[in-house]
Image: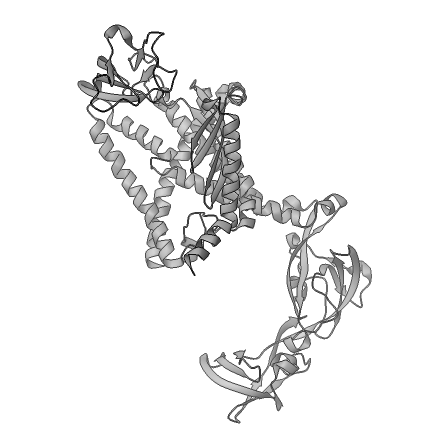
Amino acid sequence: MSLLNLITDFLLNPWFVISLIFWIIVIIFVYALKNRKEAYSLFFPLLILFKTKKLNNFIRKISKKNPRFWRIFWNIGIFVSFGFTIFGFFFFFINIVQLLFLPSELNAISPLIPGVNIDLPTLFYLLLPLLFIMTTHEFAHGISANNDGVEVKSTGVMGVGLFYLVGFGAFVEVDERKLRSSKFHRNTRLRIAAAGTFVNAITAGIAFLLLINYALLVSPFYTQVTQVYSVSPAQNGGFNYGNLEAGDVIVAIKNSEDPDADFLNLDFNQGISLTSVLNNVTKVKFSIGDNLTFRTYNPVTDLSSKKNVTVGPRYDIGIDYEYIPNGTGLRITYNHSSNSQTNILITKINGTAIDKSSGATLELFLTNFTLKAINLTSDLGTDYILDVEVVGVLIGIQSTYYWMHKNDFAKFFTSNWPDFWFKELFWLFTISFSITLFNMMPLPIFDGDRFLKELVNWKFGENYKSIKKKKDRLIYKGTDTECKLTEYRVENVESVKILLKDAQKGDPNSEILLGEDNYELVDKIGDGFKDTVLVNLPETTKLKNNSVFEVTYEYWHDDKRKIKSIVINAIRIIALSLIIGNFVLSFMNFGFVLFWI
C-alpha cells in the first residue's frame, strides 16, 4: 500500500471524521466564548473543558440534605475504596502470574481503544454508561467536598477528540490547594478521594445484580423464546426445509395430536426452551417420526401461524469427518471407537458416489428414520461398516433467541429493546468495575495516589524543623496579582521580581524588582500559615499577559518529606509495573483484539 493510500485511508476513517467534527464544534463554542476565557480550558488537540458554576448550587443542595447521612456514607466509602486498592494489587499480581504460566483469553487485559478493539456500533453502546459513570464519579467528589466545607470552584463538561479517540464526560473542580493544606483534616481528603470510586463500586454492584436478574426484570413485558436462524435442507441433514422459515419465532409447542389447549409456551426464564422440549423433559411428549405443531410469529408481517414440524433422529456414527474441496468425497479425521486420528478418504456411501453438488451427502443418508449401519467405501475400494446409534432427536434448524413481547407497550419498543438495555447494563458493569479497580491503584493520575499519600503521611508523620529557600515563578494572566506559592508554611519573602513579557535577553529593563511596600505575605488559605504573596501594583502599571512574577522565599520544610517520597514512589513503581506487565503480556499472547477491563 502506497503512502498516499495510507493517508487517504486515515483521513477517510470514520473515527477521524468524527474527531474532526468534534473539533469543529469545539472551535465554534470557543469562538462564541472568546470574551469569557475563564469559561473554558483548551488543550488542543487533546482535551477541552467547558466550565460553569451553575451546577455548583445543585451539588451544594444535595450535600446539605442530611449531612450526617453523607458523612457516614463517605466514611464507609473510605474503607470500600481502600479495599479495592488491596484487591487491585492482588488481582494484577495473580493475573500476571497466570498470563506468564497459564495464558488464557479470560486473563487478557487490553485498553479500550476505538477503531482498534472497539467498533462504531459498540461505541454507541458505551456512550450512555460512560457519561453516567463519569458524571456520577465527579459529582460524588463534589458532594463529598461540599459536605466537608471544601469549595467547589467549577463544574462542567469535557471532551476528547484525538484522531480515533473520542469521548465525553463531566468534571468537578475542587480547590485542591486549600484541600491539601492543614486547614482540612486527613479524613476530609480521604473522603473526597474515595467518593468517586465508592460510587463507581456501587454502580458496578447494582449493574451486576440487574444483569443476573435481567430476565426477571423484563418478564412483565417480554419472554425469551427461540427464533429460527436458518433451516437445513435434507442434503444437510434437515427434516423441515419448507416447513419452517428463517425468521420464524417459535412461541409455543405441542404434539400435533394434542388439542390446542396443550400448547406449551416457551420461556427461557422458566427453563422451557426448544432444547428442553426436544430433550423430552417437558409435558410435550413425542417419539422419533412424530409431528410437533409450532405456534410461530413472523416479526416482519406481524402475523402468527401454526406449522407442523417433523421430529427426526440424531445419530452418533462414531467419526469426525470433512468434505474434500471438490465435494466428491469426505475424509475421516478421527475415529472415536479407537480414539485415534485417521486420514481415510471415502468416495461412496452404501454404494452411492458422494457428490455435494447434486445432494448425495452423508447427511442425506442420516435422515433415514430406520438406519442401523452405513457402508463407507474408500478411494482404495476398502469398505468400512459403521454401526449407528440414535442419541437424540433433530429437526434441522439453527436458532438464536428472541424477545417476544407480551403486550402492546413492549411491542411498540420492539424486540431489540431488551437487548439494548442488557448491553447497556453489561458495559455499565464492565466499565464501572474496571474504573473502580484501576482508579484505586496508587498512580499519580488516579485517586488511589491520594490515598497512598495520606496513608504514608499518617504513618511517618511530619517534622517541620528546618528552613529552606525556594523560588516560584507564576504567570500573570491579566487580572490576578495573587502569587499562590507552592509551599504552605512560608516564613519570609526575600524578593519579588516581575519578568516582563517580550523583553530582550540581557536588557537591564527586562525585570522589575519590587520593594517591600509593593507586596505582602498573607495567610490566604486560613490554616494559620502564610502561603500567598499579594502584589500591589500602581494603577498606572500595565503588564502584558504572560509576564512572570518571580518570588524567592523561605519556608518551613518537612524533614520527613524525602523518606515519604521514596516510599510513595516505590509503591507507585510496583503498581505501574504490575499494570504495564499485564498489558504487555496480554498483547504478546493475544494482540489488541480483546477487551476485558
| Residue 118: image location, x then y, percent | 49, 50
Taking 166 as reference, is 473 above or below it?
above
Q: Is residue 417 left or right of residue 52?
A: right
Q: How is the image coloured?
A: one colour
| Residue 182: image location, x then y, percent | 32, 18
Inspect this view and state whether residue 281 appears: no
Which image quarter: residue 79? Answer: top left
Residue at the (67%, 46%) spot, across then down? 219
| Residue 23: image location, x then y, percent | 49, 38
- Residue situated in front as seen by the camera: 28 or 185: 28
- Residue situated in front as seen by the camera: 124 or 134: 124
Which image quarter: residue 174? Answer: top left
Residue at the far bottom in the pictured view: 381
Which image quarter: residue 105? Answer: bottom left
- Residue situated in front as seen by the camera: 284 or 467: 467
Q: Is residue 209 left or right of residue 75?
A: right
| Residue 272: image location, x then y, percent | 67, 57
Residue at the far top in the pictured view: 517
Q: Is residue 53 left or right of residue 570?
A: right
Image label count: 0
Q: Is residue 449 left or right of residue 73?
A: left
The N terminus sits in image quarter: bottom left
Taking 428 as reference, is 401 above or below it?
below
Taking 378 as reference, is 73 above or below it?
above
Taking 81 as reference, is 401 above or below it?
below
Inspect this view and state whether residue 113 appears: yes
